[in-house]
Image: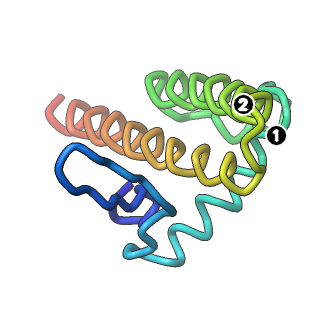
Amino acid sequence: MGYSGTVPSEHSSGASVQRVAITKTGNAHVRRILIEAAWAYRFPPKCTGALRTRQRGQPEPVIEIAWKAQQRLSSRYRRLLARGKPTPHVITAVGRELAGFIWAIGVAAERTSTAVAAA
């Protein structure tokens, strides 16, 4: 998340902590892609035929993480909007969390490929 620059900036002094906009110190291209992808979570999660076709041949842990991401990020989008947050802030928060899921999928895929290579 720090690599993409989607972490909040902070101004702290003593007991006061003030979090402001995202840092934007990371990779701008990655940040833009995450934000663009986050817009897809406006819609309810579903597994269409096209998605099932793309998932064919993928390890089961990766598919489980992807489904968990769909459910969690879609509900997070709706929950933050219901709290009255501005849409750009909601999308940025969802994009930041999406980065965490992408990292988890990378770790799971690496474990799977390491296990296959060892066998």
Q: What separation in Å lies between label 2 and label 1 (alpha carbons)? A: 6 Å
| Mark 2 or 1, nearer chain start | 1
Tell me, for residue 59, which label it has, or none: none
Secondary structure of the residue carrying numbered label 1: helix
Question: Residue sitting at 61 percent across and 54 percent down?
Answer: 92
- Quadrant that contains the N terminus: bottom left
Horizontal side of residue 72 vs 104, given as left or right: right
In this picture, is 8 found above or below 106? below
Horizontal side of residue 51 vs 63, given as left or right: right
Say which residue label 2 marks. Answer: 74
Q: Rate crowding at label 1 as few (under 14), some (14 to 19) or many (20 or more) other CA atoms within 10 Å.
A: some
* x, y percent for residue 55: 64, 35
* x, y percent for residue 16: 29, 47
Amino acid type for the residue under numbered disc 2: Ser
Amino acid type for the residue under numbered disc 1: Arg
* x, y percent for residue 102: 46, 45
Horizontal side of residue 64 vs 54, given as left or right: left
In this picture, is 28 found above or below 81? below
Quadrant for residue 113, please give it: top left
Q: Rate crowding at label 2 as few (under 14), some (14 to 19) or many (20 or more) other CA atoms within 10 Å.
A: many
Question: Residue sitting at 83 percent across and 27 percent down?
Answer: 44
Say which residue label 1 marks. Answer: 42
- Quadrant that contains the C terminus: top left
Question: Residue sitting at 59 percent across and 59 percent down?
Answer: 34
Q: Are marks 2 and 1 in contact (CB under 8 Å)?
A: yes
